[in-house]
Image (tube, rainbow, N blue to C red):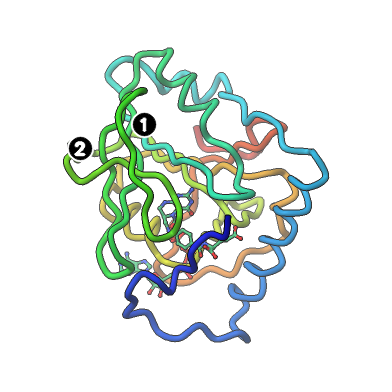
Amino acid sequence: MAVPSPSRLSSSRRPVNAAEPKYRLRTELRARRRAFVAAGNAAPIPLSDRLAAHINAETIVAGYLPQRFEADCRGLIGACLNRGARIALPHVESMKKPMLFLGWEPCDPLETNALGIEQPPMSAPELAPDIILTPLVGFDDRRNRLGQGGGFYDRAFAAHPNALRIGLAWSVQQVDTIPVDPWDVPLHAVITERGLFEPAEI
Ligand SMILES: Nc1nc2c(c(=O)[nH]1)N(C=O)[C@@H](CNc1ccc(C(=O)N[C@@H](CCC(=O)O)C(=O)O)cc1)CN2
Ligand SMILES: Nc1ncnc2c1ncn2[C@@H]1O[C@H](COP(=O)(O)OP(=O)(O)OP(=O)(O)O)[C@@H](O)[C@H]1O
């Protein structure tokens, strides 16, 4: 089934400029991600011991439900639940409104948003995450991050400055250098199917 284009969410963003370095990199890395999964290389993203040390029954962990060829967060969500953590998932209503993290427990209902991603309904409680598991399009060895370009995670990081920012990606999504804009905040750590990427700040 085709995933609806993000243009179905009303947008006030400036038009995408195909010459912009982030735009070109995104196109290349989405293709890399797709090829990696198509070749049968997808594997669980492990909960590293160093991340596990931050997770207990008091912790609120924001995860995500994967879209197409993204690194799958669901095993990690299960591992966090096993440690007693509370889970939140992103809720996106429009390109203009900030993404919210809403509480979710196994068996709670989900709705599908205009991007084709499952999310908790607005009736779920809003939570302030201690840890934000972030889907990546790309990353570099300084833990700079490239996302989908909507600015949703940039804004979430600004709204939750004390949360641990953990990127999840396939190892092939690493590049030498991610272009950094003034609003970009580096990740504390990246985890791939190979484990915790070093250097990590956790
Ligand atoms: N799984 C997941 N959930 C998420 C995000 C994400 O990146 N991944 N988000 C992060 O901001 C927010 C939703 N924002 C998004 C903004 C743009 C696109 C987007 O452009 N998707 C492309 C597909 C890219 C691909 O081929 O992999 C599309 O729909 O055409 C997706 C999500 C919240 N939830
Ligand atoms: N703290 C912020 N508040 C408001 N807008 C922001 C903030 N941070 C970034 N933006 C806007 O978000 C847009 C997308 O930024 P960028 O191209 O770096 O996307 P990205 O980091 O790949 O996306 P995402 O954060 O969704 O993963 C930019 O136009 C930028 O102006």
- Locate residue 21: give its quadrant: bottom right
> Residue tagged by mark 2?
124
Kind of element beneath mark 2: loop
In percent of width and height, residue 194 lies at 72, 32
In percent of width and height, residue 45 lies at 62, 31
Q: Residues within 10 Å of mark 2 (few under 14, many from 20)?
A: some
Q: In this view, does 124 lie to the left or right of 108?
A: left
Q: Which residue is drawn at 78% across and 38% down?
A: 41
In percent of width and height, residue 93 lies at 28, 59
Q: In this view, does 66 lie to the left or right of 102?
A: right
The image quadrant where one finds ligand 2 is bottom left
Q: How far apart are marks 1 and 2 (CA)?
A: 15 Å
Q: Does the residue labelled 2 lie within 8 Å of ligand 1?
A: no
> Residue tagged by mark 1?
61
In percent of width and height, residue 4 lies at 48, 64
Q: Residue at x 26, y 33 (%)?
A: 103
Q: Is residue 107 left or right of residue 50?
A: left
Whether 116 is drawn above or below 18: the answer is above
Q: Residues within 10 Å of mark 1 (few under 14, many from 20)?
A: many
Depth check: give the residue in front, 156 or 63: 63
- Locate residue 101: give its quadrant: top left
